[in-house]
Image: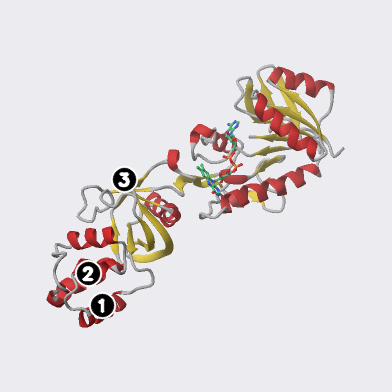
């Protein structure tokens, strides 16, 4: 037997799943469906870990007993229930960020951490679709809704290139989504939060520069002078995108390449390498896959995930000031930090894990 775990949750299915996983791993478990039962269980037997849902109606939250004289092995954290308290030496806080609040990750954990003395780096949605200005002359998203293609996104902060990202972009009725837009969103939103001048452009032929585009148009004109401008561009980007770009530039789509003026060719070249995406906002936490910002990392010991501010408290996962790009990095961060904290707590006397 690896240890004794008290599982406290008012949802039977969650309790059953947790007990099943823990018992398969060699732990002995006891279940409680409310604060009263948890307290009774904790009074009659000792547990190595209490796993509890702090959102249960009769669980009031956690309090730091900072006013109590600290004893070396004494409890410094206490779980308050409507029926009494559970003392412990260690608490793991794993309440997530603010994304998809209907799942329960509504930012409530930040308030716990703040009350326990932690700095919360201001949060923004991350991995979230971006909303574009419907009234902009460059607004082509609605007519392209459903079209997806590879682009290179460039984030400009104070007129300097800050970030380049390549990948698939999906046009939608409200703006842009798809992996590359989701990855760009945290950069755009952080810059906006900091009050910086920020804009986003899309290169429809990733890797191309204005000069390579110019050379391509000239070569194409030489080789196929009678080809229409929209047909030519459709060879490089999806036909619907080609049509939208040519229309926005007020160029006759049927114009043969040989009849393109120098200015028209140059405006096509710059449009294709740096199409302005008129971002106004994002779709918000209800559509965000992650949260940027959170508990400041310099307040956490990375070897154990223990708080440097509140003894006995461990913080893991998305509630910390870490967010990753698409590709499983956020899951990996949550699992890895939970693993580190779990091992650290296992080496301590007693413990409580909260989410
Ligand atoms: C739609 C969507 C898709 C995603 N896809 C991916 C992906 O493909 N790859 C990837 O790496 N990441 C993805 N993520 C992100 C990933 O799910 C999170 O980064 C990860 O789950 C964070 O783990 P966590 O344990 O820190 O928090 P969470 O998984 O959010 O868990 C926190 C738990 O705490 C509970 N809780 C919160 N506050 C309280 C409270 N006050 N009292 C009691 N309980 C509370 C919540 O109900 C929740 O069950 C996705 C997220 C979303 C929303």
Q: Is residue 302 left or right of residue 322?
A: right
Q: Nearer the viewer, residue 64 or 314?
A: 314
Residue ID for mark 3: 174
Q: Is residue 154 left or right of residue 8?
A: left
The residue at 32%/57% (across/down) is 197
Label 3 residue SS = loop
Label 2 residue SS = helix
The residue at 35%/73% (across/down) is 208
Ligand 1: quadrant of the figure: top right
Q: Nearer the viewer, residue 81 or 33?
A: 33
Ligand 1 within 8 A of label 2's CB? Answer: no
The residue at 40%/64% (across/down) is 162
Q: CA distance from mark 2 to mark 3?
A: 25 Å
Contact? badges 1 and 2 (CB < 8 Å):
no
Q: CA distance from mark 1 to mark 2?
A: 9 Å
Q: Is residue 28 left or right of residue 117?
A: right
Label 2 environment density (alpha carbons within 10 Å; few <14, some 14–19, many ≥20): many
Contact? badges 3 and 1 (CB < 8 Å):
no
Q: Position of residue 354 (x, y in %)?
A: 66, 34
- The answer to which of marks 1 and 2 sits earlier in the sequence is 1
Residue ID for mark 1: 214
Q: Position of residue 64 (x, y in %)?
A: 67, 32
Residue ID for mark 2: 268
Label 3 environment density (alpha carbons within 10 Å; few <14, some 14–19, many ≥20): some
Q: Quadrant of residue 15?
A: top right
Label 1 environment density (alpha carbons within 10 Å; few <14, some 14–19, many ≥20): some
Q: Report if residue 65 is visible in the image.
A: no
Residue 84's disc is none
Q: Position of residue 346 (x, y in %)?
A: 79, 42
Give the quadrant of the C terminus.
top right
Q: Report if residue 143 is visible in the image.
A: yes
């Amino acid at each position: 037997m690896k240890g004794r775990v008290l599982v406290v949750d008012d949802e039977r299915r969650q309790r059953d799943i947790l007990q099943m996983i823990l018992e398969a791993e060699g732990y002995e478990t006891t279940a409680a469906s409310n604060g009263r039962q948890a307290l009774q269980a904790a009074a009659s037997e000792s547990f190595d870990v209490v796993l509890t849902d702090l959102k249960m109606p009769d669980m009031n939250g956690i309090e730091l007993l900072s006013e109590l004289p600290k004893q070396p092995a004494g409890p410094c954290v206490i779980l308050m229930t409507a029926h009494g308290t559970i003392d412990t030496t260690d608490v793991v806080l794993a309440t997530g960020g603010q994304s998809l609040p209907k799942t329960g990750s509504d930012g409530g954990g930040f308030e716990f951490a703040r009350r326990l003395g932690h700095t919360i780096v201001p949060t923004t949605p991350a991995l979230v679709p971006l909303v574009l200005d419907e009234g902009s002359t460059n607004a082509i998203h609605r007519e392209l809704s459903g079209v997806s293609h590879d682009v290179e996104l460039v984030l400009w902060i104070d007129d300097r290139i800050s970030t380049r990202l390549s990948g698939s972009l999906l046009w939608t009725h409200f703006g842009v989504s798809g992996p590359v837009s989701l990855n760009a969103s945290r950069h755009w939103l952080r810059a906006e939060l900091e009050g910086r001048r920020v804009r986003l452009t899309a290169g429809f032929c990733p890797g191309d520069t204005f000069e390579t585009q110019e050379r391509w148009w000239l070569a194409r004109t030489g080789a196929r002078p009678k080809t229409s401008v929209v047909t030519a561009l459709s060879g490089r980007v999806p036909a619907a995108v080609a049509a939208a770009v040519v229309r926005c530039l007020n160029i006759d789509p049927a114009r043969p390449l040989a009849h393109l003026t120098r200015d028209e060719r140059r405006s096509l070249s710059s449009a294709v390498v740096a199409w302005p995406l008129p971002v106004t906002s994002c779709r918000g936490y209800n559509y965000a896959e992650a949260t940027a910002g959170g508990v400041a990392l310099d307040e956490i010991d990375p070897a154990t995930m223990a708080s440097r501010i509140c003894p006995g408290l461990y913080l893991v996962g998305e509630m910390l000031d870490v967010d990753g790009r698409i590709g499983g990095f956020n899951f990996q961060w949550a699992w890895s930090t939970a693993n580190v904290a779990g091992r650290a707590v296992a080496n301590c006397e007693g413990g409580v894990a909260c989410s």
